Image (cartoon, rainbow, N blue to C red):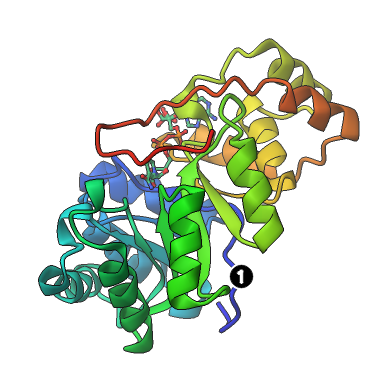
Amino acid sequence: MTSDKSIPQLGLGTYGRTGSEGIAAMLEAIEIGYRHLDTAQTYNTEANVGEVMRRSGLPRRDLFVTTKVADYNLDRTKFMPSVRKSLETIGVDQVDLLLIHWPSFGGVVPLEEYVTALAEAQQQGYARLIGVSNFPIALLEKTRALLGNDAIATNQVEIHPYLQAPNLGDYARKIGLQLTAYQPLAKGEISGDVTLERIAAAHDCPVSAAALAFLMAEGHIVIPASGSPANLRGNFKGLEVRLSDQEMTDIRRLDRGYRRINPDKSPAWDD
Ligand SMILES: NC(=O)c1ccc[n+]([C@@H]2O[C@H](COP(=O)([O-])OP(=O)(O)OC[C@H]3O[C@@H](n4cnc5c(N)ncnc54)[C@H](OP(=O)(O)O)[C@@H]3O)[C@@H](O)[C@H]2O)c1
């Protein structure tokens, strides 16, 4: 990994990849070619990610690792100790990307306090890049006003063929911010979709690869998760699939604003 601002466009979500089975799945993914691992303070996978990074034998710079500060650690007294704890748990001096996992619900911790702490974590060398997750446009605007227009490398949000987030997507394109699509397979719910099945058959690839290829062609980073070697391999094929303009149009029509992750602490979404 160089010192540039690019994020590998296809990464591995590690939610649920706990225990020795989690390690085996992550090692399999690295064997297939995944070089970007997405973890969080709340996933209980930071230690596994570190273990896998060491066992892979790859130079540190060849693996891109993201972690996220939990919403219960946004308070200034907890923020930096929690980041140091994450680095210790993973076993690295620096993560490639550090995200705010969720904005503070109801603004209990003021945005200024925790985005400033995020920038400080970067200045102290704890993170090469910084970003946010589950941020709507209004909070992105405030963050840019506080930190500068180019400070944030990505906003990680739920995006898949059934939730394409056109309002947020248009805004992100306008300001040159890349979105990271979490749950890009809608947790497997896109399997069996007639349109995606037809397009996948035309490309001789799994439905998941067609969906991921679509999201990447839209400019998004994708972080699908799987514990199955066959699915890990099938998802990675998304990097090879090139969809036609007509196929892109057909998949765009699948958007139905279907949001899977919408806990009480959610901000007011744009889509
Ligand atoms: N920032 C946030 O707030 C946030 C929220 C949610 C998720 N995330 C991140 O996004 C990552 C991905 O989200 P996710 O794991 O919830 O959902 P996902 O990647 O959309 O879907 C994973 C599910 O789909 C199945 N699957 C994977 N590949 C498949 C394939 N080729 N064919 C059929 N089924 C397949 C998996 O089962 P198998 O294991 O059997 O393959 C698993 O049940 C997470 O791991 C996490 O890193 C972030």
Q: Quadrant of the C terminus?
A: top right
- Give the residue furthest to the left: 77
Q: Quadrant of the N terminus?
A: bottom right
What residue is rendered at 53% in x and 67% in y?
A: 153
The residue to which callout 1 is attached is 6
Left or right side of 74 for 140: right
Foreground residue, 15 or 234? 15
What residue is rendered at 59% in x and 62% in y?
A: 8
Classify mark 1 as within 8 Å of ligand 1 or not, answering yes or no.
Answer: no
Left or right side of 257 for 228: left
Question: In what quadrant does ligand 1 lie?
Answer: top left
Residue 154 image offset from top left, x and y in percent? 52, 60
16 relative to 143, above or below: above
What residue is rendered at 70% in x and 17% in y?
A: 197
58 relative to 231, above or below: below
> What amino acid is labelled 1 in the image?
Ser
Residue 108 image offset from top left, x and y in percent? 18, 54
Residue 126 appears in the figure: no
- Give the residue furthest to the bottom: 124
